[in-house]
Amino acid sequence: AQTVTQSQPEMSVQEAETVTLSCTYDTSESDYYLFWYKQPPSRQMILVIRQEAYKQQNATENRFSVNFQKAAKSFSLKISDSQLGDAAMYFCAYRSRGGATNKLIFGTGTLLAVQP
Amino acid sequence: EAGVAQSPRYKIIEKRQSVAFWCNPISGHATLYWYQQILGQGPKLLIQFQNNGVVDDSQLPKDRFSAERLKGVDSTLKIQPAKLEDSAVYLCASTPDASRISGGYTFGSGTRLTVV
């Protein structure tokens, strides 16, 4: 069974600085997706960035980028030029690529605080 | 397009009472998911529907939880009788087609259930 581990329960960053959130996962599959979701106090999960395992190039979305290390099963999220609106809970998630069941498997989350 | 709608937003009940949550997915989305998010944990899949059929309910406590998706559109999740450990946020999500999606899900804002 696949598992996702986030070892940082809380992180803090100064506004305009850069922060990296860590995520490791375990799987025997070779093809899958990895995601970072943001969950603000409104509770709605918002997709931040997505990585396809067969792509070696790291995904980027504006100020958000990932460091995907497939052999090490590591998938970290870097937030550049942090803004107050980035403060939220961040979840790393895994999904198999094939099959009818496409459930997301989540880590336990990292609470990010942004200091003005 | 309208997002995933959920109601109620909050619910407080006593243990052994029953409760129901409602979800209306994005129009045309064939696949609907119910996730349970206990405080301090990542969301966990309870049940996945493809149209009005169940694809995965392996983690649904079937002695007390039930869910249906009549006509393949909106869905209801019920708990009867509730236990203290059922206190959680219940998130609904939808995707166009589980077998073909490559991106993330669209989540609703969830229902926060407190069992006292």
Image: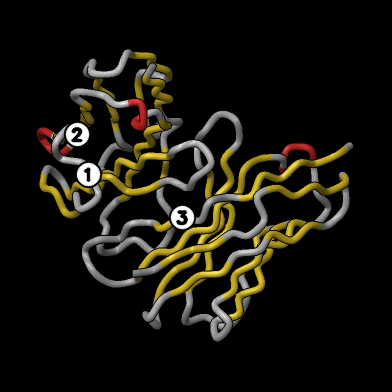
Q: Is residue A86 left or right of residue B114?
A: right
Residue of label 1: B60
Quadrant location of residue B25?
top left
Q: Quadrant of the C terminus of chain B?
A: top left
What amino acid type is highlighted by mark number 2? Phe
Q: Is residue A52 above or below residue B95?
A: below
Residue of label 2: B65
- Same chain letter for marks 1 and 2: yes
What amino acid type is highlighted by mark number 3? Phe
Marking on residue A115 = none
Q: Is residue A25 above or below residue B28?
A: below
Find residue B9 and report its horizontal and vertical position in percent: 42, 20
Secondary structure at numbered mark 1: loop
Secondary structure at numbered mark 2: strand
Residue of label 3: A106
What amino acid type is highlighted by mark number 1? Leu
